[in-house]
Amino acid sequence: MLKNLFNVVPKGSLLFIILITAAIKNFGAIIPADSAIVVPLGGNGWVNKNAQAKITEAGLANWRSDKDTISVYVRTEAAGTLNISLKLRVLGGISRISVTVGQTVLAQTVSNTNMAIVHFGGVAIVKPGYVQLKLQGINKSGEVYAEVSDVILSGTALSNGAAYVKDNHGNYYYWGHRGPSVHLNYELPNRAQNNIAYFYNEVTVLKGQDVMGSYFMTDGFTGGYFGMQVNSATERHILFSIWSPFSTDNPESIPDSLRIKLLKKGTGVHTGEFGSEGSGGQSYLNYPWVAGKTYAFLIKAQPDTVLKTTVFTAWFKEANQPKWLLIASFNRPKSGFYLNKLYSFLENFDESMGAVTRKVFFGNQWVIGNSGKWYPINNALFTGDATAIINYRKDYGGGTQGNLFYLRNCGFFNDFTMLKTKLVRPLSGNAHPEIDIQKLP
């Protein structure tokens, strides 16, 4: 009877938790109902590279090889016991599978052809942090080890809660796999408020941190962003985008009066429109930037308060080289303002790479007012995106190292930084970068 009810009772409901408790008691583990959590593999499961097994919205499928390792990550907020069960079914035959946590290997022989909860045992969690549960096949008589929809966890290690992707509302299986994006929101000098014409920033990605799918966004501002990406094993972009003031994810629906107009672009720069996250004008340069080097980004805003437009122009170079490269210049309607709300962010845009940590450094931030006066920036507020805010992922960090800010995300590390932490980096000196504004391409 319990097996059939599990298929119709909503996950997370009180009845579901009571049924979990009853099922686990049948295996000899008595667990308080309010401590059990349901961890869907669709949002929290990962397979090793070249695995035959797949993670789908419904969970683990096509699990045929004993070489496949399926990892499930959950952050527990307390030390204590952790009892582990899997909701699974075997399509045919008998399978023996294991769940490994640290050095502890728990194994069960299963043959149920309907979805049922199978208790594997318990482990001791010595401190709060991420727990990796590794599922592996030992032997089987059928073609597939099992289909697994959820991991059921309970015990005192969950007494202070847990961080994991709880459901797919808002497409969070996808966003949860991408991992949390993190930001540095720069505090602007009072004397430069509302009149910033230029924003200069430097970015350094150390060797080994240039992970596939990373966007190291250096110069962000109201209306657009500008930074560098790892797009594939052979391609890297310097990307500059401006959002249209018309709110849509479909660029074709933007009225002509609200479209971003390209005014000029640099040699070799690709331009077009983008959608799916708002819409607007986009430009990028294929550029083989190198981990370990520092790069400089410069953005300019030239407002027309009569026409209510702003021309945004972006330049890029290696920090220790004299030559600036023009990326593009766009005219944005319904604007008429200078640069404001300056920020940097770190994002993973490849959902298959959300289990890999990456880190980036930003430093030597300066702004130039419309009078030509330079102002240094050395204060920032650390924030995260919705995935971080709703506690689905907590592998995010930001801080200072020497005279640099840094951002870090993904990979299920434990030393996270509290959101809305105020950061202050030491000023390395009063000398601003030497830029001949009149000679910029």
Image: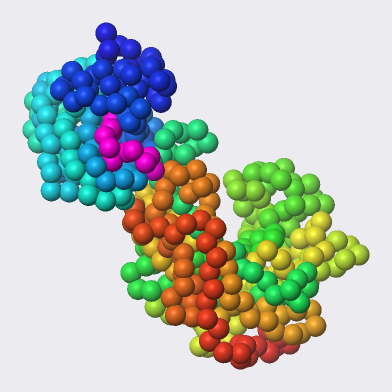
Percent x, y of residue 430: 61, 90
- Residue 292 occupies which quadrant of the picture? bottom left
- Residue 372 occupies which quadrant of the picture? bottom right
Judge by depth and name the residue closer to the eye, 373 or 174. Answer: 373
Q: Which residues are magenta?
A: 150-163
Residue occupying the point 36% across, 59% down: 415
Q: Is residue 184 left or right of residue 375?
A: left
Q: Is residue 253 above or below residue 318?
A: above
Q: Decide whether residue 273 is among the magenta residues.
A: no
Judge by depth and name the residue closer to the eye, 239 or 14. Answer: 14
Residue occupying the point 46% across, 64% down: 398
Q: Is residue 352 left or right of residue 302?
A: left
Quadrant holding the N terminus: top left
Residue projecting furthest to the right: 306
- Residue 100 occupies which quadrant of the picture? top left
Residue occupying the point 35% across, 27% down: 34
Quadrant holding the C terminus: bottom right
Q: Is residue 401 left or right of residue 303?
A: left
Q: Decide whether residue 156 is among the magenta residues.
A: yes
Q: How is the image coloured?
A: rainbow
Percent x, y of residue 267: 60, 75
Q: Is residue 108 above or below residue 317?
A: above
